[in-house]
Image (tube, helix red, strand yellow):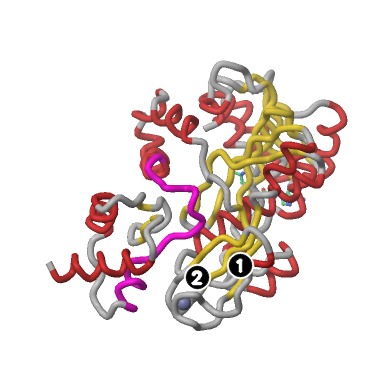
Amino acid sequence: MVGAYFSGRTCGLAAEPLAGTGARIIRLLLESGSVSEGLAGDISQWAVRLSEINRERNGLVERMRIEHLDANLLLSRLAVEGRAGYVDIDPFGSPVRFLENGFRATERRGLLGVSATDLAALSGSSRRTAYWKYGLTLVKTNFYKETAIRALAGFAVMTASRLSLGAEPVLSIAYRHFVRVFLRVERGKRRAYHARSQVRYLIHCKYCLNTSVMSDVSEWREKCGICGNPNTLIGPVWTGLLHDKGLVERILNSRHASDPTYSEAIKIVKTVAEEVDDIPWSFQLSEVSRRARTSPPKTKHVIERLKEVGYRASPTHYDPSAVKTDAPLDVLTKIVKELVRS
Ligand SMILES: C[S@@+](CC[C@H](N)C(=O)[O-])C[C@H]1O[C@@H](n2cnc3c(N)ncnc32)[C@H](O)[C@@H]1O
Ligand SMILES: [Zn+2]
């Protein structure tokens, strides 16, 4: 990922302020082809000791610095003394308290990778935590993994925009127990505004699954326009593109694509390449079928049929039984019923 992002130029310094054993920085130095220097920090003296042993074993004493320091102190120091081309924030739980300094420590046109494992908050299961920790109004939907990705991406974009930085996702993944978003970081008020204006609210009806993006508060409706049941508000979340498809292509064309070590990651990136990522939700076919009082057809067949009748449709990388489409809900429901009947 980092190699593909910086292809044609060098990343220079890659910094991981919550590095654990230092494995990630070591792999970046050995495998990315674009990182010349690494910085691994950790608050735990045991983690630092392991990083030192791993650095020695991999012959990287000259290229890798290790600091026994709090992540925010390390990032603030980098922001003042010299920023990194790539900053990786990988805590246990929520990255919230490291994000602002993470952006301050990232070079312009650089890359920031952030992961979160507090999926209960980000996906809308723990609504109170989402509210006090992220300032977000979330509810659990049948596309909760997409919500988690977009909640983290939106929070990161808003954090960057407060610093007059325009951050936009270039690759966004939900996998097992975590979500991970990579963001391109650019300087300037115009870019900050452009990115921030794509962090919006969704209106969602949990009864019929009807969902839309709200461009302005005047668009809020108490009742669903399709079934008349109460709507719920979700957000603000990132509603723009989740992936830079050019970057995704470079990853798939890289020498790592055929390396068995990366096979699981490449499988995900292949689905990402197909994803209709300008629609900030998806439909779980079991839920659409349940409402249509029928059994769920195969995801692949639904996508084929939607495309045949002129809509955009794709699978998602996070749920094999979900479909992303711009087709109206009644069209999707009709197709589901027809496919099961035939
Ligand atoms: C999820 S682990 C990192 C794993 C690592 N990225 C990897 O891929 O192997 C989180 C690490 O953050 C460290 N940590 C927790 N709080 C910290 C803080 N305030 N400053 C620096 N490191 C911290 C922990 O000691 C732990 O090693
Ligand atoms: Zn409805």
Q: Earlier in the sequence, mark 1 or mark 2?
A: 2
What's the residue at 30%, 73% (across, down)? Answer: 289
Q: Amino acid at mark 2?
A: Thr
What's the residue at 56%, 54% (across, down)? Answer: 149
Q: Nearer the viewer, residue 338 or 80?
A: 338
Tell me: residue 40, above or below residue 335. Answer: above
Quick one: which residue is furthest to the left in this view? 342
Q: Nearer the viewer, residue 274 or 181?
A: 274
Which span of residues is magenta-colored?
A: 273-291
Local packing at callout 1 (Cα closer than 10 Å; few below 14, some 14-19, many 20+) is many
Specify the quadrant that holds the C terminus.
Answer: bottom left
Instruction: Tell me if 257 is positioned left or right of 235 in this view.
Output: left
Q: Nearer the viewer, residue 265 or 252?
A: 252
Give the numbered dot on residue 234: 1
Quick one: which residue is furthest to the top in this view? 8
Q: For numbered disc 1, what is the local secondary structure?
A: strand
What's the residue at 71%, 69% (across, down)? Answer: 131
Residue 285 in magenta stretch? yes
Estimate the x, y position of residue 23 in percent, counting from the top left: 58, 36
What's the residue at 63%, 33% (across, down)? Answer: 53
Total marks shown come to 2
Estimate the x, y position of residue 189 in percent, counting from the top left: 79, 38
Q: Amino acid at mark 1?
A: Ile
Mark 2 lies on residue: 141
Q: Are marks 1 and 2 in contact (CB under 8 Å)?
A: yes
Q: Is mark 1 within 8 Å of ligand 2?
A: no
Instruction: Tell me if 161 is positioned left or right of 245 in this view.
Output: right
